Image (tube, rainbow, N blue to C red):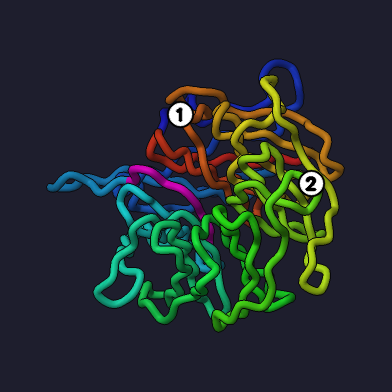
């Protein structure tokens, strides 16, 4: 954890109205004991982690990629260097490490994680070319695979449709599976036009459809599934060198106010857009201090508008509170 002064950091800087508050970092066993902290401000109940002491060297995150949380207060973080899924129970103050993709078969490059049906955890391994289904205890229970699925790097389940969306970076498309793993549809094709993809990676749900980090095209597309075909809605960002431009967009997410978040990995920024796709503000910049990033990757926002960012090369997940418009 950072010191108390760091916990007071807000964005934007200066005399502008604060929109984001830095809460702390998740790094590993040092965060083991979770407590709830009462706060009478607009933040309501927040959590923080207390540093514990260990006889052995603590297990820590090394290269976190993606995050998702469940209703029990557990955070699931994929780590490609540890080749595992880390599970932080923020209520009971415990941590587990899940290395097994299936029985006697370990993860190689777990890059994306999502919640599935019946409390399943879905983990996309980009090297193995499969999506692995785990039960709520981490026990492998199935595999989502297909001969056409080559490099899955993003995953999200849309509960209203009972469908799982998986980005295939090599194939330049989004493959849609049933909860049981049947390939139902393939959305998009290679290209730089609307509804086409060039190296798609991270995915996220949006009230209007699916956010797709079209990484090699340096943009994010908002699309919907129109009976197995891409319904293009809008594009966010464009290639450029100014703050607010994109070079290597990765994690994407949306908050309760409709704002859209894009992790710009190349420039080490989190970029925030309004619901119409207009750029609002950046957060971050290259560095190691709280609120700075070094090759950030995935992002997830919980029901309380807490923003979790996988700060990959800093070996941590940084957490911020959206304070409202």
Is residue 127 shown left or right of residue 253?
Answer: left
Rendering coords of residue 1 (x, y %): 39, 36
Crowd rating for badge 2 (residues with CA inside 10 Å; few <14, some 14–19, many 20+)? few
Q: Residue at the left extreme? A: 55
Q: Mark 1 points at which residue?
A: 4
Counting from the top left corner in percent of width and height, residue 245 is at 71, 28
Total labels: the figure holds: 2
Tag 2 secondary structure: loop
Q: Residue furthest top?
A: 14
What residue is pinned by disc 2? Answer: 193
Which residue is more in the foreground, 285 or 245? 245
Residue 74 falls within the magenta-colored stretch: no
- Quarter in which the C terminus is drawn: top right
**Badge 1 or badge 2: first in the primary sequence:** 1
Write the residue at 77% across / 72% down. Answer: 228
Residue 234 in picture, x, y percent from top left: 83, 47
Secondary structure of the residue carrying tag 1 is loop
Residue name at image x 81 percent, y 49 percent: 194
> Could you tell me which residue is drawn at 40 percent across and 34 percent down?
314
Residue mark closest to the camera, 1 vs 2: 2
Q: Above or below — where is 96 with respect to 46?
A: below
Q: How far apart are marks 1 and 2 (CA)?
A: 48 Å
Q: What stretch is highlighted in magenta?
A: 61-69
Looking at the picture, does residue 261 appear above or below residue 144? above
What secondary structure characterizes most of the magenta part? strand
Question: Is residue 255 or residue 189 the one in the foreground?
Answer: 189
Answer with the quarter of the image where residue 168 lies: bottom right
């Amino acid at each position: 954890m950072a010191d108390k002064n760091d916990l007071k950091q807000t964005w934007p800087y200066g005399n502008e109205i604060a929109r984001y508050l830095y809460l702390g970092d998740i790094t590993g066993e040092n965060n083991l004991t979770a407590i709830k902290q009462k706060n009478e401000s607009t933040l309501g109940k927040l959590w923080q982690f207390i540093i514990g002491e260990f006889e052995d060297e603590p297990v820590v995150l090394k290269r976190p990629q993606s995050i998702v949380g469940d209703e029990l207060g557990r955070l699931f973080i994929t780590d490609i260097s540890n080749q595992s899924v880390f599970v932080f129970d923020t209520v009971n103050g415990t941590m587990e490490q899940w290395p097994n993709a299936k029985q006697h078969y370990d993860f190689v490059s777990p890059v994306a994680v999502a919640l599935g049906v019946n409390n399943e955890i879905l983990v996309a391994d980009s090297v193995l070319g499969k999506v692995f289904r785990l039960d709520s205890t981490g026990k492998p229970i199935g595999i989502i695979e297909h001969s056409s699925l080559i490099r899955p790097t993003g995953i999200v389940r849309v509960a209203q449709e009972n469908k799982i969306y998986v980005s295939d970076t090599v194939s330049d498309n989004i493959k849609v599976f049933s909860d049981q793993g049947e390939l139902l549809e393939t959305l998009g094709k290679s290209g730089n036009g609307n509804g086409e993809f060039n190296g798609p990676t991270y995915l996220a749900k949006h009230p209007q459809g699916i956010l797709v980090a079209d990484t090699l095209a340096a943009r994010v597309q908002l699309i919907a599934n129109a009976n197995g075909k891409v319904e293009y809605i809008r594009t966010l960002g464009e290639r450029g060198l100014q703050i607010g431009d994109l070079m290597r967009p990765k994690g994407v997410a949306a908050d309760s106010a409709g704002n859209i978040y894009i992790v710009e990995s190349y420039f080490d920024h989190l970029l925030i857009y309004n619901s119409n796709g207009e750029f609002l503000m950046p957060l971050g910049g290259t560095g190691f201090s709280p609120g700075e990033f070094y090759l950030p990757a995935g992002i997830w926002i919980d029901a309380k508008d807490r923003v979790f960012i996988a700060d990959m090369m800093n070996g941590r997940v940084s957490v911020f509170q959206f304070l409202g418009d």
